[in-house]
Image: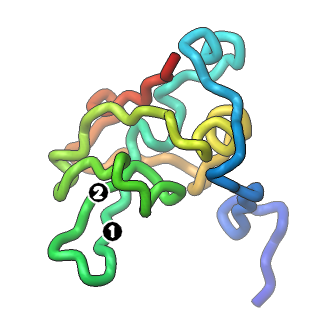
Amino acid sequence: MPVDAHDPVQLVLFPEMDATKDVPEITAACWGILGVAPDAMMCASSRMVVRRKGAPHPTVVPCTLLPYDPQFELGRTLREAGGPVPLNHPHCAPFCVLGGGSCTAARRELPGFSSAMSRPTAIG
């Protein structure tokens, strides 16, 4: 299958991600220094519903990088998952905040779920 390496819809590259490595801490001041808004992060408006093998019910997580970390389970329904998302996972800083990564080429709002319902929060 041919893939256009210059088309962000066809090819999304992820950096090597190691949750055990020390990563830069994103503080409240970093947002202004980097010229990045918390609302621009994918986790501000996107949600992923997963049902893990053997689990009694599905759960909602903020992004595709965090499906196995229980601290990022936002609830069982999209309505429950509208709260803030703390950016305190080792993948958040290098991939999303500093790296500008996104798992989608274009963000879209879910019906009945606006980005105003969820704000990523910096720690520190």
Position in image of residue 55 (x %, y %): 23, 76
**Quadrant of res 58:** bottom left
Q: Is residue 83 above or below residue 52?
A: above
> Count the marks: how many?
2
* Three-letter amino acid code at the position of disc 1: Val
Q: Is residue 1 above or below residue 43?
A: below
Secondary structure category for the residue under label 2: strand
Secondary structure category for the residue under label 1: strand
Position in image of residue 41 (x %, y %): 52, 36
The tag on residue 50 is 1
Residue drawn at the location 55% of the way across and 22% of the way down: 37
* Closer to us: 114 or 121: 121
Distance from the alpha carbon under mark 2 to that under mark 1: 6 Å
Residue drawn at the location 33% of the way across and 31% of the way down: 84
Q: Is residue 96 above or below residue 9?
A: above
* Closer to us: 53 or 10: 53
Residue highlighted by disc 2: 60
* Closer to us: 40 or 77: 77
